[in-house]
């Protein structure tokens, strides 16, 4: 059983809070000194005694004898805070630590705050934290540093984030005699929110980059068609052809703009509008979009489709984007007068589309990264090919996977060309009857 005993001692004004750390009273009440003063405060201590009469703990209250108002000792208040608090001298020796600080860091053997940090901090944070704190104390300026401490929750994260903020205790503390007070507060939840917000911003930026990239593709054939109309305004066949090109590509742009308007609600995900169509329709749109670049580089495009139409139940505009990006990608990485081939075929219940070129190829160790956003994997030995921002193949993969399909790349290495294979899934493609 614990016994209770009340002791009243007298301490000078100003001493309350400065000398009433409970660690200083770790002895029997009878041996406490009488610190009398003419004008004084009264410090009431309620020691908690164990059976052997040793002091197991105590509760302190300061009483002002002048007006009989009772105030709680500042260090008692600090010990009741939910955040960790410590006071150190300029050399880093601990002068005070509340119970929450002890809970986080324990009691270092040499009473040094640096030892406590080195023992408990995540190894990646230790040196950075200690160096930052030491520089701030050396320069006499406030500091703030973030670090990770082990988590005691079995099913929670392994490490929790904390922010430590420190400053000189008072304006009277200067030079080597300065005392520093630091508070340590948990910030794991805020860190998680920051990561979520950063992820949202990255997804938004990636979507906008892809959208701008895709908007650029239809503009090229539109400009090409306008140039054609300008050269032969009196040729009805060419005028009709140019008008059809512009109309198709404007529909493409309109669809992409609609996606932008929906992006905020869908967080940048791909939307699909399924319909039944012939694979040759999407191939024609893609060839039309890539034609200006292919002609500019005097390359040769070959399209191989079976005589009987391949009917798809998919999004024709999105599939057109995929094929456009693959053809433009091949054109960019194929030398002038090079060859590009697009082959479409039924593959069991699905369809396979291959785009091959005899261009600069892809090094085998980079094939796995070829479809990552903003990735350019031209062979290191090649410097005269400019492949853009590394967006088109990432868009192609996103669209194909949204259809439940897959896309892959093959290459025998630098200078050996490349092949991109799109596979659309079962029940997406069916063969129609042959015509003619």
Image (cartoon, rainbow, N blue to C red):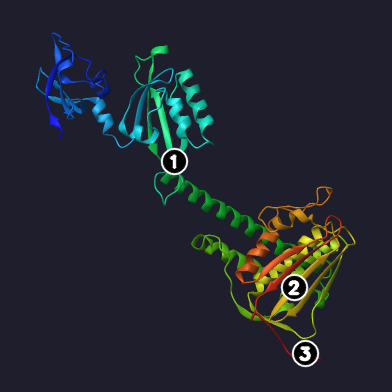
- Which of labels 2 and 3 is toward the front? 2
- Which of labels 1 and 2 is toward the front? 1
Marks 1/3: CA distance? Answer: 69 Å
Image location of residue 183, percent across then percent down: 37, 31
Which quadrant of the view contains residue 250? bottom right
Q: Quadrant of the N terminus?
A: top left
Q: Which residue is drawn at 41% across and 52% down?
A: 155
Drawn side of residue 238 relative to residue 76, left or right: right
Marks 1/2: CA distance? Answer: 52 Å
Mark seen at residue 353: 2
Q: Is mark 2 on a helix, strand or loop?
A: strand
Image location of residue 424, percent across then percent down: 67, 74
Whether residue 401 is visible: yes
**Closest to the observer: 387 or 262?**
387
**Closest to the observer: 300 or 18?**
18
Residue at numbered disc 1: 150
Q: Do the residues labelled 1 and 3 touch (CB within 8 Å)?
A: no
**Closest to the observer: 229 or 396?**
396
Q: Quadrant of the C terminus?
A: bottom right
**Closest to the observer: 35 or 67?**
35
Q: Residue furthest top?
A: 38
Mark seen at residue 316: none
Within 10 Å of the Cα at label 1, are there few (<14), some (14-19), or many (20+) other Cα atoms?
some
Which quadrant of the view contains residue 184? top left
Mark seen at residue 434: 3
Q: Residue at x 79, y 54 (%)?
A: 363
Q: Do the residues labelled 2 and 3 touch (CB within 8 Å)?
A: no
């Amino acid at each position: 059983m614990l016994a209770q005993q009340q002791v009243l001692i007298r301490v000078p004004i100003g001493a309350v809070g400065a000398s009433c750390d409970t660690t200083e009273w770790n002895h029997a009440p009878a041996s406490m000194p009488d610190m009398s003063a003419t004008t004084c405060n009264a410090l009431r201590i309620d020691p908690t005694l164990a059976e052997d009469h040793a002091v197991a703990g105590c509760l302190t209250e300061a009483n002002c004898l002048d007006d009989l108002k009772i105030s709680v000792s500042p260090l008692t208040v600090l010990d009741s805070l939910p955040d960790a608090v410590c006071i150190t001298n300029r050399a880093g020796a601990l002068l005070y630590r509340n119970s929450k600080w002890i809970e986080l860091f324990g009691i270092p053997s040499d009473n040094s705050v640096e030892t406590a940090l080195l023992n408990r901090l995540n190894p990646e944070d230790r040196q950075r934290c200690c160096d930052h704190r030491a520089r701030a104390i050396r320069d006499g300026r406030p500091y703030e540093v973030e670090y990770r401490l082990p988590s005691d929750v079995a099913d929670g994260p392994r490490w929790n984030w904390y922010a430590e903020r420190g400053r000189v205790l008072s304006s009277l503390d200067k030079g080597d005699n300065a005392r520093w007070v630091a508070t340590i507060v948990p910030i794991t939840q805020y860190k998680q929110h920051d990561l979520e917000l950063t992820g949202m911003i990255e997804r938004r930026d990636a979507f906008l980059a892809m959208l701008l990239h895709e908007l650029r593709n239809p503009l090229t054939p539109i400009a090409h068609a306008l140039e054609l109309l300008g050269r032969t305004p009196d040729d009805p066949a060419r005028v009709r052809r140019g008008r059809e090109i512009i109309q198709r590509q404007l529909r493409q742009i309109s669809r992409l703009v609609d996606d932008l308007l929906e992006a905020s609600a869908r967080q940048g995900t791909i939307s699909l509008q399924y319909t039944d169509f012939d694979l040759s329709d999407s191939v024609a749109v893609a060839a039309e979009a890539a034609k200006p670049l292919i002609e500019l580089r005097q390359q040769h495009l070959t399209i191989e489709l079976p005589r009987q139409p391949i009917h798809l139940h998919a999004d024709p505009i999105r599939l057109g984007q995929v094929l456009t990006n693959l053809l433009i990608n091949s054109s960019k990485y194929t030398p002038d007068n090079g060859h590009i081939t697009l082959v479409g075929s039924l593959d069991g219940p699905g369809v396979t589309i291959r785009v091959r070129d005899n261009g600069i190829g892809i090094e085998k160790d980079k094939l796995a990264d070829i479809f990552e956003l903003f990735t350019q994997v031209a062979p290191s030995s090649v410097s005269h090919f400019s492949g853009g921002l590394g967006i088109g193949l990432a868009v192609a993969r996103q669209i194909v996977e949204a259809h439940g399909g897959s896309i892959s790349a093959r290459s025998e290495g630098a200078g050996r060309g490349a092949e991109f294979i799109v596979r659309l899934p079962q029940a997406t493609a069916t063969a129609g009857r042959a015509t003619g």
